[in-house]
Amino acid sequence: MKKIIECVPNFSEGRDLEKIEKIVNPFRGKDNVKLLDYKRDEDHNRVVVTVVGEPDAVKEAVIEAIGVAVEVIDLRNHSGQHPRMGAVDVVPFIPIKNISMTEAVELSKEVAKIVSEKYNLPVFLYEKSASSPDRENLANIRKGEFEGMFEKIKQPQWKPDFGIAEVHPTAGVVAIGARMPLVAFNVNLNTNNIEIANKIAKNVRFIGGGLRYCKAIGVELKDRGIVQVSMNMTDYTKTALYRAFELIKIEAKRYGVSVAGSEIIGLVPMEALIDTAVYYLGIEDFSMEQILETRIME
């Protein structure tokens, strides 16, 4: 049976279309690799790529794309609303079909070893691949971002898992690991006050006493004159999207602010949206088996 792995690398470039195309090109025209989506965000100054395919083919394409990003992105001249510590900020591998999480972890370590040696790029393993509990959460690794990493990496507890303890001068460092599927879910607010978004994000995210499988930060969308609560829902089966949406609405009322809308970054499992639709429509005893596309694909 064919094994299918998904990879969702995040690159720190969302404005220069020529650079973005160069980074994405290694995922095109390859046997056993399918480029599903890539979405750039100018405010975040970031592009999120989604690819699937057979493990070895995806591995080679990812390694090639990382090399391009290291070559064309200079973080010394980079600014954006999304936290970042590397030209290739994070590379997660997600098991999709006929492949175990253990195999995904091993694949992530193979890629980490190769890119550290090939591109002189320090690598931190995170999530299911993490070498210690304090490295499971990407936010812990990324704290301090690119600028702060030059001092941070010298600390014994932050020695990289692969590569020397020396930040790449232009490409920074990268986090590579294996994880469950997550949903990048953002909720926009009708205000330009970033402090309100930060306070709401703090109350919504798990580390601040909020939802268990939710990570959140406040982000400015300067072009639109609004702010947003930008979230990673790390297990949508246990913390549904509608719970995060409703909690943000409740918190926003404290500041006399309303929700302007929401967005999904990249691809999303159908179940995550169906679950939310069932909640808002009040459908009783609904099953995924009632979805036409589910029955067609059987």
Image (spheres, grey):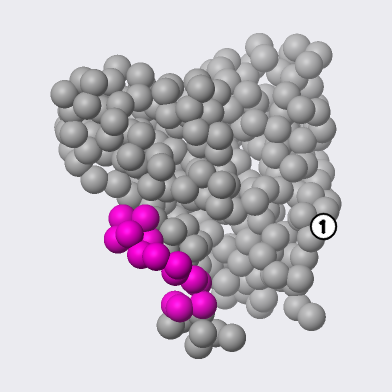
Is the N terminus in the top left, top right, bottom left or bottom right quadrant?
bottom right
Left or right of 237, for residue 77? left
Q: Which residues are magenta?
A: 277-291
State the SS at label 1: helix
Asked if 13 appears above or below 60 in the picture, the reply is above
**Image location (x, y in percent) of residue 235:** 57, 47
Q: Is residue 87 above or below residue 111?
A: above
247, 112: nearer the viewer:
247
- Occupied quadrant, residue 51: bottom right
Task: Examine the rendering and report whether any part of residue 144 can be seen.
Answer: yes
Among all residues in the image, which is located at the extreme front?
284
Q: Is residue 158 above or below residue 244?
A: above
Give above or below for 113 relative to 212: below
Residue indicated by mark 1: 103
Q: Position of residue 80 (x, y in %)?
A: 38, 31
Q: Label 1: how many residues lie within 10 Å, few (<14), some (14-19) or many (20+)?
A: some
Residue at 51% over, 77% down: 289
The picture places residue 292, in percent across and down from the top left corner, at 43, 82
Quarter holding the C terminus is: bottom right
Membership of 42 in magenta stretch: no
Write the residue at 77% across / 36% down. Answer: 130
- Residue 205 is situated, as x and y percent measured from the top left of the image, at 48, 29
User: What amino acid type is highlighted by mark number 1?
Assistant: Glu
